[in-house]
Image (cartoon, rainbow, N blue to C red):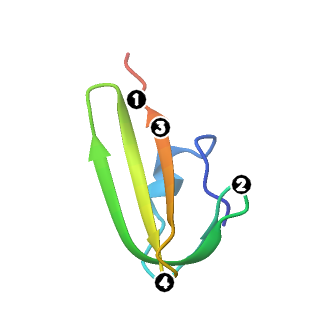
Amino acid sequence: MIVSANLPTSALLEVKVKDKISDEKGTSGVVKAIQIQETDEYLLFLFALADDKIISVRKIKNIC
């Protein structure tokens, strides 16, 4: 699965530990931990990979 800011938030929330993911820059690997940081403006998804790399995806919150 390729993760990016273009994916719906619901799809990012479905990523689980042990899933294989990649980003648009060529970083890929197996997820070993997931952290989600939230501010008033955006959600930051941090996917820690088994090889100690991190894929981060920043999603702007839709405010209605």
Image side of residue 28 versus residue 54, left or right: right
Image side of residue 8 versus residue 52, left or right: right
Q: Which of marks 2 and 4 is in front?
A: 2
Element marked by disc 4: loop
Q: How far apart are marks 2 and 1 (CA)?
A: 23 Å
Q: Distance between the residues labelled 4 and 3?
A: 22 Å
Residue 39's place in the image compared with 22, above or below, is above
Q: How far apart are marks 2 and 4 (CA)?
A: 20 Å
Residue 22, located in which quarter of the rendered image? bottom right
* Dot 4 crowding, Cα within 10 Å, few <14, some 14–19, many 20+: few
Q: Do the residues labelled 1 and 3 touch (CB within 8 Å)?
A: yes
**Residue that mark 4 sits on:** 18
Q: What residue type is labelled 4?
A: Lys
Q: Which amino acid does label 2 sit on?
A: Lys
Of the numbered discs 2 and 4, the one sitting upstream in the chain is 4
In the drawing, what numbered circle is on residue 3? none
**Residue that mark 1 sits on:** 61
Q: How far apart are marks 2 and 3 (CA)?
A: 17 Å
Q: Which amino acid does label 3 sit on?
A: Lys
Residue at 51 percent of width and 69 percent of height:
53
**Residue that mark 2 sits on:** 25
Residue 5's place in the image compared with 41, above or below, is below
Residue at 61 percent of width and 48 percent of height:
4
Residue 56's place in the image compared with 38, above or below, is below
Q: Where is residue 2 in the image (x, y as percent from the top left)?
A: 67, 60
Q: Which of marks 2 and 3 is in front?
A: 2
Element marked by disc 1: loop
Of the numbered discs 4 and 3, the one sitting upstream in the chain is 4
In the drawing, what numbered circle is on residue 59? 3
